[in-house]
Image (tube, rainbow, N blue to C red):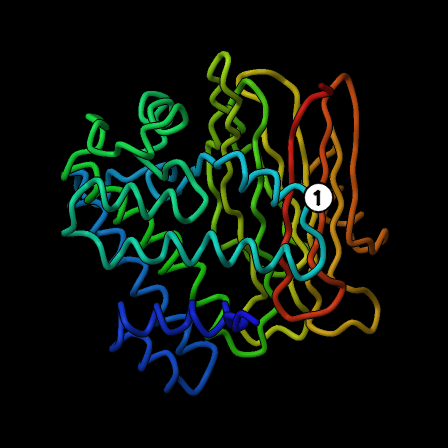
Amino acid sequence: MHPVIDIDLKLKQGFRSLFPEYAAALEKANSQEEINKLQAAFIEERKQVLADALGKDITELEASDQTAPIPLKKETYEILINATGDDIKKQLHVLIDGLERLKSMEDDDPGLVTAQILLSGALGIGLLSTSTVVTELAVGAAEAIAALAGVTVATVGVVVAIASLVIVAVIIPIIYFMQKPANCIVLLINELDKPLVFESDYNVHGKPMLMTTPIPEGIEIPGVAKYPIAGFIATEKRENALVGTQYGFTMRYGDTDTKFSFGVECPLTSIYSDNNCYCAIGESAQKVAETTTDKNKQFWEAEKDGFKLSIRCNSGSGSIAYFVARVYKDR
C-alpha cells in the first residue's frame, strides 16, 4: 500500500523551507492585524522582486503583471473539470505545490524549471504562457526541453518572480496563517477563443485578494489539442469581521459586450448558509454575489447564446472553500 501524502503539510513545509523567517513570523503573530501587516509587507517585497526581474520601477507594474495565467496540460484539465468533493481541494493544492517549488529553482537551468512546471500539471506560467512555448511543449518538447528556445535565464527569473508573488505571497498565507479564516480560492478555466478580462466585482462581505486578469484564450494546436488557460481568484473575510466572505466578479469576453459572472461564499459559520457558488451570463457582480447565498448550492451552471458556465465547490463546510469554474462553448 502506498503512503498517503498529506498535501496540506507538504505545502506548509515547502513554504517554511523557502521563507523560514517569514513563516516563523507569521506563526508567532498574535492577531489577524499583525498577520495582515506581515503579508502586505511580503507582497510588496515580492512585487519589488518582480519589478527587478522585469527591469521596471515598481510603480510601473500593472495588475496584469502581478497575476499568473496558467496553460493546463490535457490530463490536468480533464481531472480538474471532473473533480468533486475533496478532489477539488487536492488538485488545486497539487497545482499550487508545483508552482510554489519554482521559488527554490530561480538559479537553476531553464530546462529544469520548465520540467517542474510540467510536473505541476501546467504547460507554463506567466511569461512562459506564450503560444510559441506552449505549442513546443504540447507537441512533444517535454521530452526534449532543451529545444525550447523561448525559455531563457531571464524568462525563468520573471516566471519565478510571478509564481512567488501569486502563489507564495498571496495564496499560501491565506491557506495556512489567517486566524479564523473564511476564504474562497477559485481556479477559473478559460476554454474560449478570446481572453477573459476583469470587468467588475462586488463584496457583500469580505475583500478580494487576487484577480488574474486577463486570463488569455485557450491555445489550439491543429491536429493535436486545445489547451485551456486558467487563473486564480481569491477573496477573504475582513479583519475582525463577524461574517465571512461573499463575493461576485464579472469577466468580459474579449472586447465584446458579453459578460460572465461568478458568485462565491464562505461564511464564518454555517448557521444561515454553507460554502456555496453561483454563476450567470449577463448578470452583474452584485447580483451574483447576492444570489449565491440565496441559492446555497455547491454546484451551479448557466447557459446562454451558445456559452456555458459552471462552478463547483469542494464542500459546503470548511473555513477555506475551493472552487473550479469554467467558461466554455457547446462542442
Q: List the single residue furthest toward the front.
A: 1
Q: Is residue 241 above or below residue 126?
A: below
Q: Quadrant location of the C terminus? A: top right
Rendering quarter of residue 90: bottom right
Image position, residue 171 (x, y; %): 45, 59
Could you say which is closer to the camera, residue 6 or residue 42?
Answer: 6
Image position, residue 185 (x, y; %): 57, 55
The type of residue carrying mark 1 is Ile
Q: List the single residue furthest toward the top.
A: 222
Image position, residue 327 (x, y; %): 65, 31
The count of marks equals 1
Q: Residue at the location (49% across, 18% down)?
A: 224
Q: Residue at the location (21% across, 41% down)?
A: 156
Q: Residue at the location (20% across, 36% down)?
A: 155
Give the side of residue 205 with respect to residue 120, left or right. Answer: right
Q: Is residue 38 above or below residue 309?
A: below
Give the side of residue 193 with respect to residue 97, left or right. Answer: right
Q: Residue at the location (62% across, 36% down)?
A: 250
Q: Quadrant location of the N terminus? A: bottom right
Could you say which is closer to the camera, residue 162 or residue 236?
Answer: 162
Could you say which is closer to the camera, residue 55 or residue 320?
Answer: 320
**Which element type, helix, strand or loop, lies under badge 1?**
strand
Q: Residues within 10 Å of mark 1 (few under 14, many from 20)?
A: many
Could you say which is closer to the camera, residue 59 or residue 51?
Answer: 51
Rendering quarter of residue 58: top left
Q: Is residue 14 above or below residue 30?
A: above
Circle 1 sits on which residue?
A: 311
Image position, residue 166 (x, y; %): 38, 52
